[in-house]
Amino acid sequence: MFPIQKPLSNGRPLKKPLLFRLAKLSIVNCLIEILWFYGITFCGPLRSVLVFELSPSVLFAAITGKSSTSKTRGIFCLFIGFVALTFMDRDKDTEDKHSRTHSHHSGLNHLFYHLIGMFGVADHQGGIAILFISLILRIGYDTAFRHLAVEIGGPKRLYALVSMGSAAVLTPLGILSMTMSTAHYDSLMHFLFLLVVATVFVMVLDFYAESVCFQHVADPVLAAARWSPVTMFSCAITLAYLWYGPLATHALTSGVVLALVFFIGATISLTSSNAPKHKGGHFVGTSEHGMPLFEVGEAFLQRTSKSFLLFFKETLHEILANSDSRKIFYFLCVNLSFCGVEFLYGFWTNSLGLISDGFHMLFDCSALVMGLVASVMSRWPASRHFSYGYGRFEVLSGFINALFLCVIALFIFIEAMERLFDPPNISTDRLLFVAVFGLLVNLFGMYSLGEHGHSHGGGSHGHSHGEGGSHSHGHSHGNANMQGVFLHVLADTLGSVFVIISTLFIQWFGWKWVDPLCSLILSMLILGSVYPLLKSSINTLLQDVPDEAMDELEYHLSDILEIEGVQSYSDAHFWQLKGDLNVASLHIQVSDTANAQLVRLKVCFILYFIEDPLLNF
C-alpha cells in the first residue's frame, strides 16, 4: 500500500499535531492487532471471526441512540449470542492448569496464559474475552480514524500511514518473538509466502473492498455494517464445517451455531434504518379520464415493527380470554415446570431414566402447544379467503393428535409383544418416584380438561336464500381439539398408572413379564379411546354428514315441502364444518304468487335449531 498511495509525498504536509495523533492511532491499532492475534490463537479462527468481525457500528448502535423495538431485539440477540459462545461452547482445547502446562512460555505468551489461568477459565473463553476487548477498542479506533481522515487527506492515505507505523512497531516484536520461540519451521520460504498472502488478504484487500463499497453503495456505512459481518459469518461457518472434524480442536459446536444465528439477528436488527419515511405522495400526472395520479410515499407501504413484549402480552390476553385455551395453557405451564425439574434433577444425578421421561414430557408439551395454537386460531374472524373462518383448525388439531396417539399405541403394541416372550432386565431405580409425580401432574390435567372428554353442546349456523337458500344447523359433536388434548393426558395418566403397577410387581415378586403385559393393555386402551375421535375428525375433514344430523335434516326437509307456495327444493348439500356447526345448502323453488319473505320465515321456524341465521339475497 505504501508504494501505491505514496502517503508521505501526496497530500498536505504532516505537521507535528497530526503526527502525534497519527502515532497514537498506530499504537492503538498495534494493540488491537496483538489482541486479535492472541484471541485467534486461543479460540480458533471461527470464533474469532464471530466476535472480532462484528461491526463496531453494531455495538455503537446498541449502546447509543434512542430506544426502539429493533434496538431491544438486537441487544437481546447480542447478549444471547455471547452467552452461548462463552458458556454453551465446549471447545476441545480446554486446559485449566495453565500455570503448569504453559510455564515454559515467555513474554506476551506467558502474560496472556497467566491471566487466563488466574481466572480459571478455558482457553477459548479467555480468547473470546480478549477479542471482545479488541472489539471495544475498535469502536474508539474507527471514530478517531474517520475524524483524522478528514484532516489528513482521505482514508486511503491515513490507512497507509497507520499501517506503516504499526509495521514499524510490530515487526521488531515479531522478529524478537521468532528468535525466542522454540517453534520449528519446515521451510522459511513457505512461511514467508503464507505471511505475505495473509497480509495481502487481511490488510490490503479487505480495506480496498470496503473502499469500493463506500463508493458505489447508497448508504455505505449501514450496508458495510450489515452485510460484511453476515457474509464473513456465513463463509466462516461453511469453511469450518468442511475443514474441522467432530473431534478436532476448535471444532464446530452447537454453541457456535447458536451464537452465529443470534449475531446475524443482532446485526440485522441494529443496522435497521430508523430514518422517518416519506408519508405523503407526489403528483405524477393525470389519467386518460383527467383524474390526478399520485405516487404513495414509503411509509404507506412499510409495515411497522411490533414489540415482542407487546406481541406476547396480546397473545397471552387472547389465550386467557377463552376457557379452552386458558385450561390448556395452565396445564402446559405445569407440564413444562415438571419437565424442567426432571431435566435438572436428571442431569444433576446423571439419571438416564429421569432425562428420558423429561423428553417424553417435552413431547407431550408439543401436543399441548399444538392444541393451544389451534384453540387460539380457531377463534380468528372470517376473512375474504376464509369465509367460514378458521374453526376447522380444531378438527385438524384433533385429527393430528389422534393420529399421533395411534402411531404411539402401535409402537407400544409391537414392542410389548416382543418383550412379552423375552422380558428384558428393567432398572426400577427412581422409576416409582417419576411415575407417581407424573401421575399427579396428569391427574391435574384430567381435572382441568375432563369435561371435554365427551362434550356435547349447542351450535351456531347461517341461513341464506336467493331463489333458494343455505343455512347452518347446530348439532354439537364436541370440540375435536380439546378431545385430542384430553386423550393425550388420558394416555399419559394410564401410562403412569401401569408403570406404578409394573414397578411394584417387579420389586415385590420379580415378575418382569408384568411390564410388557401392562404396555400391551395400555396400547389397546389408547387405540380404543382414540378411534372415535380419529373417525369423527376424518369424517368432518371429508365433509361427511353425521347420521343423526342427516335423519333430522330429512325430517325437516319434508316439512319444508308442506309450506304453502313451496313447489320443490333442489341442490341439497350438507356437511359438517366443525364439531358444533353443521352446514346445509339448498335451493327452494316457490310459485310466482308466493311471498318469498313469508316462506323464508316459515323455513326458519321449521329449522328452529337455528339461533342466528345469516341471510343473503
Image (cartoon, rainbow, N blue to C red):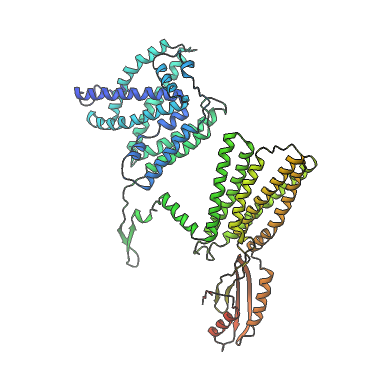
Q: Give the image location of residue 553, x and y in percent.
A: 65, 75
Where 436 sits versus 537, above or below?
above
Q: In the image, what residue occupies the spot 54% across and 85% down?
A: 598
Does any portion of residue 15 appear in the rendered image?
Answer: no
Count of numbered circles in the view: 0
Task: Name the residue furthest front.
Answer: 508
Q: Give the image location of residue 419, x and y in percent.
A: 76, 42
Q: In the image, what residue occupies the spot 50% across and 31% down?
A: 89
Q: Give the image location of residue 318, x and y in percent.
A: 48, 58
Specify whether 388 is left or right of 211.
right
Where 168 sits versus 12, above or below?
above
Does any portion of residue 266 appear in the rendered image?
Answer: yes
Q: Nearer the viewer, residue 267 or 395?
A: 395
Q: Nearer the viewer, residue 127 or 300?
A: 127
Where 175 sits versus 472, above or below?
above
Q: In the image, what residue occupies the spot 50% across and 57% down?
A: 319
Q: Nearer the viewer, residue 181 or 343?
A: 343
Q: Quadrant of residue 324?
A: bottom right
Task: Name the residue furthest bottom.
Answer: 593
What is the quadrant of the N terminus in the image?
top left
Specify whether 134 is left or right of 365.
left
Q: Give the image location of residue 197, x and y in percent.
A: 43, 22
Q: Quadrant of residue 178?
A: top left
